[in-house]
Amino acid sequence: MSNCIFCEIIEGSIPSEIVYEDEAVFAFRDINGQAPLHVLIIPKQHIASINDLETNNAHLIGQLYLAAKEIAQTEGYTDQGYRVVMNCGEAAGQTVFHLHLHLLAGRPLTWPPG
Ligand code: DGP
């Protein structure tokens, strides 16, 4: 999709530090990391937010979580623990309207989040 930063990252026209890629999923380090590990896991298909999900996206959402599990394992955080979170809408802090999971690890993560 034009005018989408994350679509441009998938295409490679905006550089990123890629940590995972398969036929449907792309993952790269957050430019403004909030923890020693902060990776964004996104579908290659442009979907703006959770509000735009449809029933036929259910498998894709599972693929995002399986990628999170694999990246956490590759980066060495399986046993220590990690957080996977998806913001939906401006009040929740969503700033980029291309669906993305945040994968965070490497420091104590408090609850509830701010
Ligand atoms: P959210 O606030 O949930 O929409 O998260 C968007 C995240 O995207 C935020 O943590 C910063 C990150 N981000 C925005 N622009 C870029 C970029 O050009 N490159 C990378 N690597 N991350 C970006």
Image (cartoon, rainbow, N blue to C red):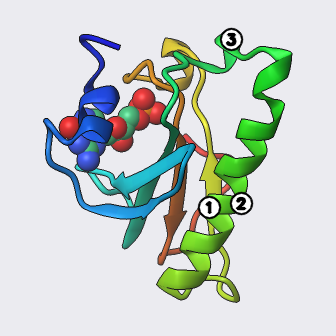
Residue drawn at x 52%, y 55% is: 22
Residue type at mark 3 is Asn
Residue 94 vs 23, above or below: the answer is above
Provide residue 60's location: percent of width, then percent of height. Answer: 71, 38
Labels 1 and 3 touching (C-beta < 8 A): no
Q: Quadrant of the N terminus?
A: top left
94 left or right of 49 in image: left
Q: Quadrant of the C terminus?
A: top right
Q: Is mark 3 within 8 Å of ligand 1?
A: no
7 left or right of 84 in image: left
Residue 74 vs 4, above or below: the answer is below
The answer for how far apart the CA atoms under marks 3 and 2 are is: 21 Å
Provide residue 9's location: percent of width, then percent of height. Answer: 26, 38
The residue that disc 1 covers is: 68
The foreground one among 104 and 18 is 18
The residue that disc 2 covers is: 66
* Label 1 packing within 10 angstroms: few (<14), some (14-19), many (20+): many
Residue drawn at x 41%, y 60% is: 38
The residue that disc 3 covers is: 51
